[in-house]
Image (cartoon, rainbow, N blue to C red):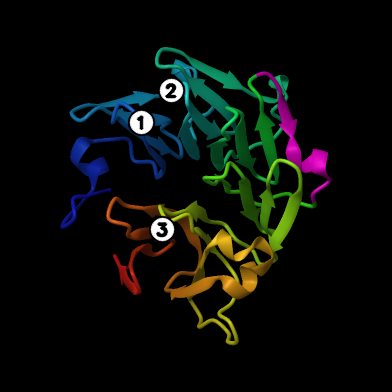
Amino acid sequence: MRYDGTTFTNVTNKEGLRRYRAFSLLEDHQENIWLGTTGAGLYRYDGSTYTNFTTKDGLVDNVILSMMQDSDNNIWFGAMGVTKYDGTTFTSFTKEDGFTSSDVNSISQAPDGSIWFGTRGALFHYDGETFVNFTEEQGLNITRNSYIPTLIDRKGHLWFSGANGIYHYDGEKVRHLFQPTSFSLMEDSHGNIWFSGGKLKGQDLKPGTSVLNRFDPAAGLENILAAREQIEVKAGAIFGLTEDKDGNIWFGTGRGIGRIDGDTVQYY
């Protein structure tokens, strides 16, 4: 779907794209739009034409769950394994390369150039040569089938979450900050960390609702429960968060999307 501020357009129908769910999106540094699907591989939109890429072109899988462009302009695609695209060639990494997990749900790059991959039940770190299972190395008890979002904040610190809550890693110590399940993470333009999960302070959630939390790390990581601001939203689960150029926060749910403009929540 494309939204121009007024109208939602179903691009799949209009352009005749293969009818698979679009699961991930990326705008690269050349302003191409990449769309990852759940069976049709990738589409790249250059402003006029949609080009399809699949396993025949070198993708590790035709289910693309996540994407990220690194500081060297390579684009990484997460699936049942990982594929790197250097602008010409697709190179895939699997268990033979040490990447022994599946369902790569998130990809983030640290200031030192290394890359973090949140997978189903594990977090992997890649230094440019070797893949290391970080959760196993740290002895973390991550639920086997948990979806793991990752975030590198402006300090270069790693945040990751999932069925076991939220963790923070500053390069030296891993801290478990938040116990409830949290499947969405984002840092906004003010440095606040947004995450889903938990209950409203002092009250139970209404059926069919979830909580979005906004936390300023300046309040101290040990105060995340007390210092977070909470917004109750109409969603059984929140699957994605992003901030637009006007500072509005958009979130995806199983029943549509929502936009937060200050204290106002609007649903589509």
Above/below status of 244 relative to 130: below
Earlier along the polypeptide chain: callout 1 or callout 3? 1
Q: Which mark is residue 199?
A: none
Farthest right residue in view:
139
Where is residue 102? Give x, y as percent.
64, 37
Where is residue 56? Give x, y as percent.
46, 17
The residues bearing labels 3 and 2 have C-alpha atoms spaced at a distance of 27 Å
**90 or 220: nearer the viewer:** 220
Secondary structure category for the residue under label 3: strand
Determine crowd level at label 2: few under 14, some 14-19, many 20+ residues with C-alpha closer than 10 A: some
**18 or 124: nearer the viewer:** 124
Q: Which mark is residue 73?
A: 2
Q: Going 55% across and 42% down the picture, which residue do you hit?
A: 106
Residue occupied by mark 3: 252
Type of amino acid at the residue the image marks with label 1: Asp
The residues bearing labels 2 and 1 have C-alpha atoms spaced at a distance of 8 Å
- Highlighted magenta segment, given as a residue range: 129-140
Q: Going 29% across and 65% down the picture, which residue do you hit?
A: 268
Earlier along the polypeptide chain: callout 3 or callout 2? 2
Magenta region includes residue 206? no
Farthest bottom residue in view:
203
The residues bearing labels 1 and 3 have C-alpha atoms spaced at a distance of 21 Å
Magenta region includes residue 135? yes
Where is residue 91? Give x, y as percent.
53, 17
Cβ–Cβ under 8 Å for marks 2 and 1: yes
Cβ–Cβ under 8 Å for marks 3 and 2: no
Above/below status of 181 relative to 84: below
Type of amino acid at the residue the image marks with label 2: Asn
Type of amino acid at the residue the image marks with label 3: Gly
Q: Which mark is residue 28?
A: 1
